[in-house]
Amino acid sequence: MFLANKNFPRPSILLLRAAGMPVKSIQEEFQGIMDEQVIQIATAEKLTILTFDKDYGELVFRYGAANPPSVIYFREKGHDPLFAGRTLVSLLLENGARFENAFTVIEQNSIRQRLYKTGDR
C-alpha cells in the first residue's frame, strides 16, 4: 500500500503498520537509492509514496514521469515523529480519504490533491 521515503519518520512507519497498513521502507530495504528509483519501485509495486521531499512534485509533474505513482507529500513535519502516521491513520480510518491516482499535499490544517490525468496510472 505505502512506500515510506528515506525521510519518513520510523515511528510513523511503525504506527501505520500497527494500524494494519502495509508499509515498505526505503530506510529498511533500499538505503541510498535515488528518488527516480523510489518512483520506479512505487510504480512497479503500485505503492503510494510517503515523503517530506518536495522534489517529488517536480519529478512527477515537471519531468512527466510516465505512469506516476501516487504521492503523499507532507509539507510540515509536525511537532513529533508520529505526526505523519497519526494524520494518515485519521484520514484513512476515520475519514475514508482516498489517495489513488493523485499527488496529495498534507499541511497542518489542510489537504490538497492534484489528480493525475486518466491514463497516467
Image: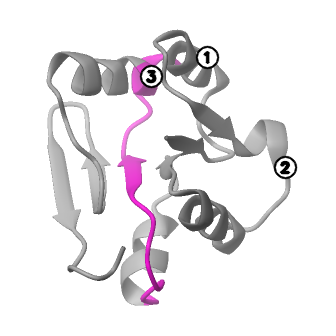
User: Which image quadrant for residue 101?
Assistant: bottom left
16 in the magenta segment? no
Residue 64, horizontal then vertical, whole percent: 42, 88
Task: Residue 118: give x, y in percent of width and height.
Answer: 21, 79
Residue drawn at (51%, 57%) of the image:
46
Residue at the spot 46% in from the left edge and 89% down from the top edge: 63
Instruction: Say if the magenta span includes residue 74.
Output: yes
Discs 3, 2 touching: Cβ within 8 Å: no
Name the one closer to the observer, 15 or 54.
Answer: 15
* Mark 3 / mark 1, whichever is N-terminal: 1
| Residue identified by numbered label 2 | 31
Q: Earlier in the sequence, mark 1 or mark 2?
A: 1
Reading the image, the residue beneath label 1 is: 14
Q: Which residue is mark 3?
A: 85
The residue at the point 71 percent across, 69 percent down is 37
Q: Which residues are magenta?
A: 63-85
Cα distance in 3D space between marks 3 and 1? 8 Å
Q: Are marks 3 and 1 in contact (CB under 8 Å)?
A: yes
Q: Check the image and report above or below for 15 versus 95.
A: above
Q: CA distance from mark 3 to mark 2?
A: 21 Å
Inspect this view and state whether residue 55 appears.
yes
Q: Please state the horizontal and vertical placement of residue 52, each as a whole percent of the image.
A: 49, 47
Residue type (three-letter) at the residue carrying disc 1: Leu
Which of the marked residues, 3 or 2, is nearer the chain's N terminus?
2
Label 2 Cα neighbours within 10 Å, binned few <14 / some 14-19 / many ≥20? few
Q: Amino acid at mark 2?
A: Gln
Residue nearest the observer in this picture, 63 or 97: 97
